[in-house]
Image: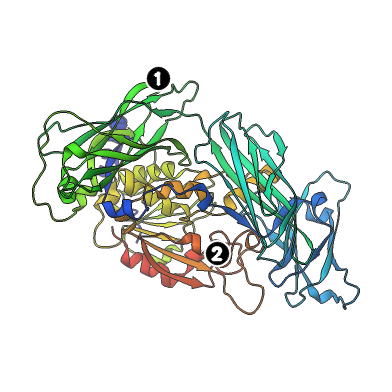
Amino acid sequence: MRMKILNSIAVFLVLSISPIGAAEDFVEVKNVSAPPSDILSGRLRLAEPSALPTSAWTALVPFERALPELRTGPGKTAVALITREPSDWTFSLVASDDTKPSPDSIFLEQTASLEQLTSGATARVIRVDPSHVDRRVSIQVSPSATDSEAWLLIADGREDIRLSTHVGSFERFRDRPLVVHAAIENARIIDSECVVRGPSGSTVTLPFVGQDERSATATFTPDRIGDWTIRSLFLLRDDDGTIRQRSTQQVIRVNDRTVRFTQGLPSVTQVVPGEALRVAVPVDVTPAGELSDDRRVAVAAEVWGTDSQGDFVPVCWISRIHELPAGGGALDFELSIDPRWLSLASVEVSSLSFRELRVHDTDGFNLIDHQSSARAALSGAFEIPDEVTRVTPDMMAAHSNRTVRGHSGLGVSSLAGHVLLLSHGYCTDQFPFRLSDFSGDYELFEDYSQNRTHDEFALRFESLGRSFKSMGIVGHSQSGHAATHLYTFYWSALDWATDGTRIQGVGVPWLGTALAGNAAVLGEIFGIGCGISNDLTYDGCAAWLSFIPTSVRAETDYWTTSFEDGFFYDYCQIVSDLLLTDPDDGTVERYAGQLAGANNRGHKEGWCHTRLMRDPPQCKDASRNVVLDAEAAR
C-alpha cells in the first residue's frame, strides 16, 4: 500500500535538516557517453527539418473563410464548428447534389468537448455517412447577434490530398529570416497564404511563392524571442477539378543566439593519468540581461580518431548539461571522454577530432549553435588503458562533480524507501492511473494544470526522489519524456532502482504530436489552457531525441493504444481525430508513440489517451497496470 506513516522522530529529523538543505537545490549532471554504433546509426544526429513535416488532410479556418461547399471523398467526411457559444450559431450541412436523394440520415450531429486542445471552446460536429461518396454538400453557418468567434474544421474525405509544411532551419533566431516550405500531394495549388503570429499577439499575413504547382515557400523575419505560431492555408484543385482547402498549424520557439562556438580549438587534457580526458570547448556567452530564470543548455559532440589501419572511425559520443552564467563572456564548456573508448576503438590520442558539436537550449531544445568539425588541441601526456574488450555502464554515465540548480520544495507524505513513482503528463487536472491496481510502496507526482519543459519536469522528479533510497517511474504522456530525460542527464534516485524496468511509459508522444501546433492556434482564438509546449512538437521531440542514447532507451518500456477499429467511423476524440493520422489515441498517433531502441510492449485497441474520449482512458486498464506494477524497478 502507499506509504503513509510518519513517526515523531522522523518528522523531527526532516524539520531539523530543512533549514540547511540549500545545497540540495543543486543537482549533479552526468557525463553522458554513447558508443560508435549510436553515431553510425544516426540516432544521435539532428535530423534534417524536411524529415519532420507537419502534415494535414483537413483545413482549420475562420468560418467566413471556408468554402461554401465540399465534395465528399472515400475517407472521413465531417465539419466541426468550434466556438465558445455553439448554441448561438445556426450550423448545418445540406446535400446539394440534385441528381441524388439526400435523406437527413446521411448526416449525424454531435457535440464534443475541446478540453484536450484548448479551454473555452466547444465543437458541434456533423459527420457524413461514409457510404455517401462523391456528394456535393453545402456548409451553412450563420452567427447570432453576439460577438462570439467561430472556426470550422473541415474534413472532405480525401485523405490522400495532404499539405506538409516545415521550417527550413533549426536555428530560429530573432531578426534572422526563416523559410516555411510547403508541399502538396495529389492536388495543385490555386492560392495560398502564411499567417504568422508573434509573442506580442500581432499577426502578419505573408504570400507563399510557388516553386511549381505542388510546392511553395514563405519567408518571415521574427522580431521577438518567444513562441510563434504559423498557419499555412492552401486552396487546391484536385485531379477532378474540385476545389479543396488544406491547412497546417505549427509552433516554433524563437531565441537569441546565447552561445556561440569560437574559432579556438577544443582542448583535450588528462589531469590524472589513466582517468577521464577533459575536453574544454571555447564559447562566447551573451549576458542574461533582464532574464531572471536559469539558462541551461545541452552540449554534445562526436569524437573521432584514426585507427591502426589508418581509417577515420567514431570513438564515442559525449554530452553534458551546462548552466550559463548571468554575466556571459568567454568560457569553456567542459565535456569528458572515458579513455576506455579510445582503447576499444584502437585509436591514437594524437588523431582525435570532433564532429557535430552542438549546443541546444533545454527549453524546447532549439539549436543554438553548431560546428560541423573541429580538430582537437592536445595538451600534456595521456595514459590509455590496454585490452578493453567491452562497454560497461560507468562508461556511458559518469560522475562529473559539476552541478546545476535543481528544483526545491517538493515534499512527500512518507519517508525514504524503494518507491515506484507514478506520474501524470502535460496540463492534466486529474491523476490518470487507478491506484487500486498498484501495490507496495509508491508515490504520486502531482503537478496539475502546468506546462513544463522536459527539463523542468525531470528536475521535479529529481527533487521528489531525494526523499527515496531509489525509485522507478511509471509515466503517462509527457512524463515518459521527463523520466527518460532525468535518467539521461542527471544523477537521481532513478539510478539506484533495481530488479525491474526503471522507466515505463503509457501513451508517450516520443516523436511529438500535431496537437501541439493546433492547440496553440485554437488557444490564441479561444483562450490558452496551459500554454504552448515546444517540447511536444515534432521538431522539439526530434531535437531532444538526438540527445537520448540507446543505453537509456534500453531501460525504457512503452505501451501505445488507439480507438477500437470496427466497421464504422471510429475515433477517440472526434475533433482531434481530424487533426491526426489514424490510428491514434486521441492525442498521440501510433507511429509517433514509438521510441527506437526502447522496448515496445505492444499496442492495444479500445483505449484512449485520457478521459472524455469515446473509449476508456488508457491508464485505467487494470491488466496493464498490474504489469506496470509487477515489472517496475524500485
Q: Residue at x 47, y 54 (%)?
A: 424
Mark 1: which secondary structure?
loop
Q: Crowding near pointer 2: few (<14 within 10 Å), some, many (20+)?
A: many
Of residue 474 and residue 13, the one placed in the foreground of this image is 474
Q: Residue at x 42, y 30 (%)?
A: 294
Along the polypeptide, which appears first: circle 1 or circle 2? 1
Mark 2: which secondary structure?
loop
The quarter of the displayed image where residue 123 is located? bottom right
Q: Residue at x 17, y 36 (%)?
A: 350
Left or right: 174 as drawn, with respect to 490: right
Of residue 210 and residue 264, the one placed in the foreground of this image is 210
Left or right: 329 as drawn, with respect to 386: right
Q: Is residue 5 visible?
A: no
Left or right: 454 as drawn, with respect to 206: left
The quarter of the displayed image where residue 435 is located? bottom left
Position above or below: 434 against 485? below
Q: State the image coordinates of residue 76 (x, y, percent, origin top left).
A: 69, 69
Coloring applied to the structure: rainbow
Which label sits in the foreground, 1 or 2?
Answer: 1
Q: CA distance from mark 1 to mark 2?
A: 46 Å
Q: Which residue matches tag 2?
A: 585
The amino acid sitting under disc 1 is Gly
Q: Which residue matches tag 1?
A: 327
Q: Is residue 515 visible?
A: yes
Q: Crowding near pointer 1: few (<14 within 10 Å), some, many (20+)?
A: few
Q: State the image coordinates of residue 115 (x, y, percent, origin top left).
A: 63, 54
Position above or below: 355 against 152? above
Left or right: 373 as drawn, with respect to 608: left
Residue farthest along the right direction in this orientation: 98
